[in-house]
């Protein structure tokens, strides 16, 4: 632990920490309300945060960990590459080899000066609807390298000087991006959010003084470190190891990607080490993890298993070390390796493998695995809109739900979407998607018996069916989980696998496994089913009343209730539990297991 700091007023510590979070929330609301594309304004695929002037993550509020746990790398790159940082600067950074997550996440960094000193960096990161890829998607799993991927890469370039746009950069984006006006509106929203952060931080510094804020930063990081030290000291010493595998993608990764997470817990030293070095080398596809994603996804898995009230900042990070190696699929990629899909897929597997490894400690620890499938319910759709003079459109939808993992205390959350989002992404409004884009959503439903059974049940997966109206619709996605479902832990059952089918106008169904890049004609539809979450604990220990509730909600069928949970319902009566028959059935099922 760092050297003890002089006492800092605990009341002021609480006040200033909440002020910092309030600034991040105001930045977040600015971007949410001002953005033009649905992937930002409706799905909330963006995050804001504050980093200290020397490049340490300070405040995240409700930011998605996949976006912000690596922003210190980007802020450090900004200071290193630009020794002439000045008031009024802003930088565009989406370079995955220089600390960003993946090229689709355009990050705006604004250095905040007070009395001539760089005190903070305000950060707004948003997933774009389009970034100039060679095909209309921001997730190009089949790209063999960055050249085939085709994304515009900005390695922390100055996009504003003295508060004025650098028009050369703006013109580059408008020329290459398929929806230039939409991109520019999103850019203005992001730079506006970062500038809001700048103004509020300047006002805070004027109110309390730079010296007091520096003392606060030191005290806040030390407090955060003490909190996680207490939590780690509760853990038993030992090593945890878990393996998983990203599913094959024909023509891309035909044998899948085996993955391994090794954790070492040292409660005496209050340290957790996560070793990702024993994994395959980078692959000629877009599924490689950037350095930022390799770090943030395993850290997310750890934090999912600890006290949720522990602050997530550089002070906490002192106690978690992530060991990476160069040219590793979950490590430090070398240019020109593609990291197009770095934020999802393999990243979701890392979150799951880490949090479920903690279940090996014993009862009450860890979580099951959650949905790993970025199905066509979460595809990038594009085409021409006949309603608006054949205008081009492109957007990533979030119409899936994604079954959440069960925990020792609760059932899985229905609207997890994917593990890397930590529940902070929003599901789209069907009505708004249909207004914004020329498509028809035929149905959206939860699937019975898709959540992994357990004492705590995994959340059910979601099915969505949609198609074009008057013009063809291009659908691109990179799903996982169609072969290897989210696993249950401590006796809990696995969730169901994902599925994607094209439903042709003539009644035929075509199953799509792996990378999806199809054009739907009017009359065709596509059906995406994501994974149900894994269960936690023995299903025979689930309270019969909770099984009854699930049957009434149609999340669990009567057949599964009897065959898996052992719950028998009374005959010739409204749905009610037959308690004696349930006890007998559970004894019989337990004996049959041996």
Image (cartoon, grey):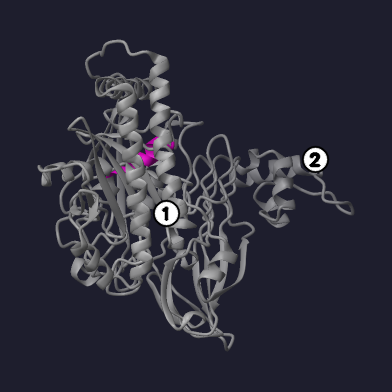
Circle 1 residues within 10 Å: few <14, some 14–19, many ≥20: many
Find disc 1 in the rendering and name its residue.
Answer: 45
Circle 2 residues within 10 Å: few <14, some 14–19, many ≥20: some
Mark identifier at residue 578: none
Looking at the image, residue 361 lies above or below residue 428: above
Q: Are marks 1 and 2 in contact (CB under 8 Å)?
A: no
Image quadrant where residue 354 sits: top left
| Residue 20: x %, y % from top left | 38, 32
Q: Is residue 448 left or right of residue 224?
A: right
Residue range in magenta is 295-304
Please check the rendered image and state whether residue 171 is part of the magenta-colored stretch, yes or no. Answer: no
1 or 2: tag closer to the N-terminus: 1
| Nearer the observer, 246 or 137 | 137
Residue 297 in sight: no
Element at label 2 = helix
| Residue 507: x %, y % from top left | 59, 85
The residue shown at (66%, 54%) is 555
Q: How many marks?
A: 2
Query: Which residue extends farthest bottom?
Result: 506
């Amino acid at each position: 632990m760092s050297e003890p700091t002089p006492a800092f007023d605990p009341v002021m510590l609480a006040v200033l920490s909440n002020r910092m979070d309030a600034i991040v929330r105001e930045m977040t609301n600015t971007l949410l309300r001002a953005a033009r594309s649905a992937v930002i304004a409706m799905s909330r695929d963006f995050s804001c945060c504050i980093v200290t002037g020397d490049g340490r993550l300070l405040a995240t509020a409700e930011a998605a960990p996949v976006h912000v746990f690596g922003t210190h790398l980007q802020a450090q790159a900004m200071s290193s590459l630009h020794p002439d940082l000045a008031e009024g600067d802003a930088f565009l950074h989406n370079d995955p080899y220089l600390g960003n997550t993946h090229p689709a996440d355009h990050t705006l960094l604004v250095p905040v000066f007070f009395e001539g000193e760089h005190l903070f960096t305000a950060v707004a990161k948003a997933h774009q609807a389009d970034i100039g890829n060679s095909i209309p998607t921001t997730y190009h799993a089949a790209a063999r390298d960055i050249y085939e991927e085709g994304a515009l890469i900005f390695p922390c370039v100055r996009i504003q000087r003295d508060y004025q746009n650098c028009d050369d950069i703006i013109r580059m984006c408008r020329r290459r991006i398929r929806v230039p006006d939409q991109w520019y509106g999103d850019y203005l929203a992001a730079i506006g959010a970062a500038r809001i952060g700048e103004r509020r931080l300047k006002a805070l510094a004027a109110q309390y003084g730079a010296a007091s804020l520096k003392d606060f930063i030191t005290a806040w990081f030390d407090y955060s470190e003490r909190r996680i030290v207490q939590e780690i000291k509760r853990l038993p010493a030992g090593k945890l190891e878990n393996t998983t595998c990203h599913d094959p993608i024909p023509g891309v990764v035909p044998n899948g990607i085996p993955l391994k997470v090794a954790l070492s817990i040292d409660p005496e030293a209050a340290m957790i080490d996560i070793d990702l070095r024993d994994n395959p080398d980078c692959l000629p596809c877009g599924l490689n993890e950037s350095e930022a994603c390799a770090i943030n996804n395993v850290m997310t898995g750890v934090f999912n298993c600890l006290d949720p009230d522990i602050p997530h900042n550089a002070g906490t990070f002192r106690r978690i070390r992530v060991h990476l190696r160069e040219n590793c699929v979950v490590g430090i990629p070398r240019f020109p390796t593609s990291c197009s899909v770095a934020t999802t897929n393999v990243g979701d597997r890392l979150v799951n493998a880490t949090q479920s490894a903690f279940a090996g400690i014993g009862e009450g620890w860890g979580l099951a695995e959650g949905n790993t499938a970025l199905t066509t319910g979460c595809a990038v759709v594009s085409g021409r809109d006949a309603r608006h003079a054949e205008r081009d459109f492109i957007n990533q939808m979030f119409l899936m739900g994604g079954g959440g993992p069960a925990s020792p205390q609760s059932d899985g959350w229905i609207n997890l979407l994917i593990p890397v989002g930590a529940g902070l992404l929003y599901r789209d409004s069907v009505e708004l998607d249909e207004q914004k884009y020329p498509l028809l959503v035929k149905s959206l439903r939860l699937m019975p018996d898709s959540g992994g059974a357990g004492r705590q049940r995994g959340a059910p997966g979601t099915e969505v069916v949609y198609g074009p109206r008057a013009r063809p619709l291009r659908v691109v996605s990179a799903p996982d989980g169609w072969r290897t479902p989210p696993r249950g832990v401590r006796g809990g059952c696995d969730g169901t696998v994902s599925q994607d089918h094209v439903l042709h106008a003539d009644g035929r169904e075509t199953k799509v496994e792996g990378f999806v890049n199809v054009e739907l004609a009017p009359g065709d539809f596509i059906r995406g089913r994501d994974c149900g979450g894994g269960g936690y604990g023995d299903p025979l220990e689930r309270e019969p009343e909770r099984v009854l509730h699930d049957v009434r909600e149609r999340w669990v069928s009567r057949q599964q209730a009897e065959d898996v949970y052992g719950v028998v319902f009374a005959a010739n009566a409204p749905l009610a539990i037959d308690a004696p028959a349930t006890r007998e059935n559970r004894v019989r099922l337990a004996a049959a297991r041996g």
